Every structure is written in structure tokens, then in C-alpha cells.
Amino acid sequence: MSEPKEMMSRPIPAPAVYIETKPFWDAAAEGRFLIGRCLDCGKAYWYPRNICPHCFSDHTTLEESPGEGVIYTYSVMHRSPTGPYAIGYVTLNEGPAVLTNFVDTAPDGLTIGMKVKVKFQPTAGGPPVPVFAPV
Amino acid sequence: MSIKGKAYLMGAFEHPLRDAPDTSTAQLHAECARGALADAGLSHLDVDAYFCAGDAPGFGGMSMVDYMGLRNVRHMDTTETGGSSYIVHVGHAAQAIAQGKCSVALITLAGRPRHGGNRPGARMAGGGGGGGLSDGAPEAGFENIYGGSTHNTYGMCAMRHMYEYGTTSEQLAWIKVAASTHAQWNEHAFLRDVVTVEQVVNSRMIADPLHLLDCCVVTDGGGALIVTSPEVAKSLNRPKVGVMGAGEAPKMPLGGLDLDLTHSGAVWSGPRAFAEAGVTPADIKYASIYDSFTITVLMQLVDLGFCKKGEGGRFVADGNLISGVGKLPFNTDGGGLCNNHPTNRGGITKVIEAVRQLRGEAHPKVQVANCDLAIAHGTGGSLGTRHCAATVIMEREG
């Protein structure tokens, strides 16, 4: 039996938190993943904001999401002092694509279409941030 | 109001330096301006419009107009769309000239990423820093923390393109092979060695699926352009390169529904420029195509209509982009992949080489015969997140 390959991980800096996005980060600190939803056109969106990027309505909310979806694309960065890491987009089951890092997998362990789920990774001096891992 | 035939590219200059430890960024801008004005046979006092983007130091356009003593400027535009800014500027300059706002427009770019300024990837490198509410780019908290750089965000596009269309690393490598074949004749090129497909695909992986040789060079330096009114152009003793059409188009996630990373904003900017010029891709004799990475070239060529969707890989392979060999000679200066990508912005060198080709002043080994119609196209920002595409079509007059 061969040794398991090293799992990718990457230290993530604290995110910029704005007045507009503080509710998202407060929920993240409680382990809850929120996405934007327009109460007029009904469409979901990412990243969270108070004005709907689909219909320009200001009648919007943040709703809790299970954070489940599939990998739309990814790229494993090899030019990194902290080891390889994967950036990519998840297409959430609700529709929006989310830019993120993929964790808990080896550098050659990702494929487009793979099912993934959100988890939160701690940051230094800031709220935890959403990352995605294969399910 | 159409810009067709209303403005001419009459000066172009590419700074010869590729490593500038001892020249300030402002000075590089000014040296480029001097070169382009000398090429056109004009003085800085003739300049009545100035165009620059985010690479201009200090207060941008205001700092540079003062530094260069451009006391007759009456029109300014500091539109910032990353590397494509300068292509946008050509179109905007033509509009301003057509409307009588100015008659001699100067566009400059310069920077020194090898010496601390404008480091590649810096745009998305950092987080927001803990503590306290800040305000800035609205997407920052949700994107900048994930280690996105140009390499891996373009890598994401290449990965999806391969998944949907079967595009291969070998096909992408042909783009670098073509650029290097041209660069061998450019005495100023940062990389002059001709490379093979095998060398490209066997170079070390940077960001899947992009190898080291799929990436452009990092160079200091810059460039400048002069756009004039027909009256000024007529008075100058230089070949006339007319600006025939221009298009620009931003593309971004816009909420993230229906994300499609297999095309760029060129699907919109290209048709706008072709329609204004009244020509089609089949009429183009030479193409300057932004080559931050090999995948950038492939996607833009497809988006501009040089081949059908899904056929980009086959179109760029087997030397089809090599001058004198293939059907569409591209980036005959060696492009950003081999020649120059000053301060990580390649738009201006795209226009400069197109002007050389239309004047018949490209290197004889890469000069396209009877080159009377050319396109320069660029993508600024990131293909994988948000960017602006810009297209300019130029014609040799007389």
C-alpha cells in the first residue's frame, strides 16, 4: 500500500470585511454559509451584496445554503512557497459560481464535475472563510 | 458618429529596455512619449490629448502631464482596463478626434515590475487584513483571499476549455512556438530562442494546465502611440495608418449564474469593431493578439471569429500563426510570450507591431506581404474573473 499523498492546504489571510458584508462574515464565524438572494426576481447570486446583480433591485436577502455543488473548473498552483494549492469555481446547487480554494485532496485529486461541499477555514485575525472539499 | 477614417496612428515607439534598474517609471513614460513623437515628427507641444492608465505613477494623468510639460493638453482619458487599456485608448482617442476635442493624442504605458513596482499577481495577492471595517473593491473579501494570480485564474479557463472542447497542451504550445519563431528576429526581444512543442509541454507546470512556457515574460519598459486628426496626418511625412473600427466589452461573473470561462469579451468587442470598419476576419492580413498566456490567444482568436467555436486548438496548431507559413500571421514581434510585456500590460505593444506591419516596417523576416489591414486585440484584467476586451482595426492608406 502506497503512502497517501499529501493533502493540499494553504494559509488564507483574513478577508476584507465591509459594512455591507459583515452579516455574511458574522454567520461564517458561526459556521453558516450564506448566499445572496433577490426577493424581487428570485434569483440567487454570489458574491453577497445588497443590490441584486440580476435585476438591480435593493430588495435582497442573505439565505443559508448547504454549500453543495460541483467543480466548474480549477487550477492547481505549483509556484507557491507554501506548497501546491487549488483555486477554482464551484457551481452551487442554487446556481451561482463561487471562487474558492479546494482542500482535503491531493494535487491530482480534483476533476471537473466532482461533488464538493463547503467548510470553513480559520484565518489569522479575521473570520473563517469558505473553502470546499470533495464529499 | 463613426470613427472610420477620422483618425490615424502616426507615431509608435517601443522602449528598448527590458530591465530598467536606474530609470524611474515617470521617466520611462516620458522616454516612450519622446520616441513616439519623434517617430511621428511631432513635438510635445503638439500634444493636445493625453491618455494613460493605472501604470502611470502618482496622480496618473495629471502627474504625467505635469512631468512631461504637456501644456497644450485639452483632453484627458485615464480609462483603466488593465492591459487592454491602451487599445481602449486608441478607440477613445479616435472618438475624441472625430468630435473635434483634440488633434494629437498621446498614449503612454511604462513600469518596472522587475524592480519593485507593479509586481505580477499583486492585484489579488493579499487579504483585507484583520480588524476593523474597510471599504474597497466589493469583491475583495470573497476573492482576494484565495491566492488567485494571473497564472491560475487563466489556468482555470484553460482547464475548462480542455474539458469542453478537447483542447490539448500541444495545441496551446504551438502558439508559443509561433511567437518564438518570430522573436528570433527581434533584437530587443526578451527571449529570442526558438522553442519546440516538446519544450513547451515539458517545461515545469506553473498552474495546471499552464506550463512555464505557456506564460508571457515579465519585462520593464513601455510604449507609446500617437493618434492624430486627418489634417495633422496629412502634414506628416509618415505612412498613414487609419483607425477603422474599435470595440470594447467588459465581461464579469455578474452574480455567478451561467458562468462561462470558455469565452472572453472579444465575442462582443470584435463584432463591434468589424462592423464599424466594414470588414470581416477573413479580410485581416495580420493579427496582434494579446498573449498573456497561450490560452488567451486561442480563446480570443475563436471569439473574434477567425475560426469556429471548438476548432481553436486545430486552428493554432502546425504553424498556422507563423508569418510566411500559416494563414494568420500573429504577434510578429514575438509578442508578450517572447518579446515584451511591459509592466504586465501587453496592449500597447500589440498596436505598435500592427503599425509596423501596416507601414511595412516589421522585420523583413516576419513582414507580411501587402499588409494593408490589421487587427490589435487585448484582454485586460483576468480572463477568469473580470476583464475588459478591446479591439482596434487599422488600415494602411495609400
Image (tube, rainbow, N blue to C red):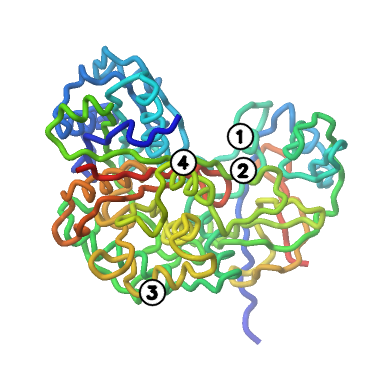
Q: Secondary structure at mark 4?
A: strand
Residue found at x 87% / y 37%? A39
Q: Are marks 3 and 2 on the same chain?
A: no
Check disc 2 and report the residue beneath it: A13
Direction from residue B16 to residue B125 in the image, left or right? right
Q: Secondary structure at mark 1?
A: loop
The residue at the far top in this view is B71
Direction from residue A5 to residue B173 in the image, left or right? left
Q: Are marks 4 and 1 in contact (CB under 8 Å)?
A: no
Check disc 1 and report the residue beneath it: B129
The quadrant of the picture occupied by the C terminus of chain B is top left
Q: Quadrant of residue B241?
A: top left
The quadrant of the picture occupied by the N terminus of chain B is top left
The nearer-to-camera label among 3 and 1 is 3
Check disc 3 and report the residue beneath it: B202
Direction from residue A64 to residue B126 in the image, left or right? left
Q: Are marks 2 and 4 on the same chain?
A: no
Residue type of the residue flagged with mark 2? Pro
Residue found at x 26% / y 70%? B325
Query: x, y (%) of residue A46?
Result: 73, 44
The residues bearing labels 3 and 4 have C-alpha atoms spaced at a distance of: 37 Å
Query: x, y (%) of residue B242?
Result: 29, 39
The nearer-to-camera label among 4 and 1 is 4
* Chain of the residue that carries numbered disc 3 in the rendered image: B
Q: Earlier in the sequence, mark 4 or mark 1?
A: 1
Residue type of the residue flagged with mark 1? Gly
Residue found at x 63% / y 62%? A73
Query: x, y (%) of residue A8?
Result: 62, 63
Residue type of the residue flagged with mark 4? Gly
Q: Secondary structure at mark 2?
A: loop
Q: Are marks 3 and 4 on the same chain?
A: yes
Q: Are marks 1 and 2 in contact (CB under 8 Å)?
A: yes
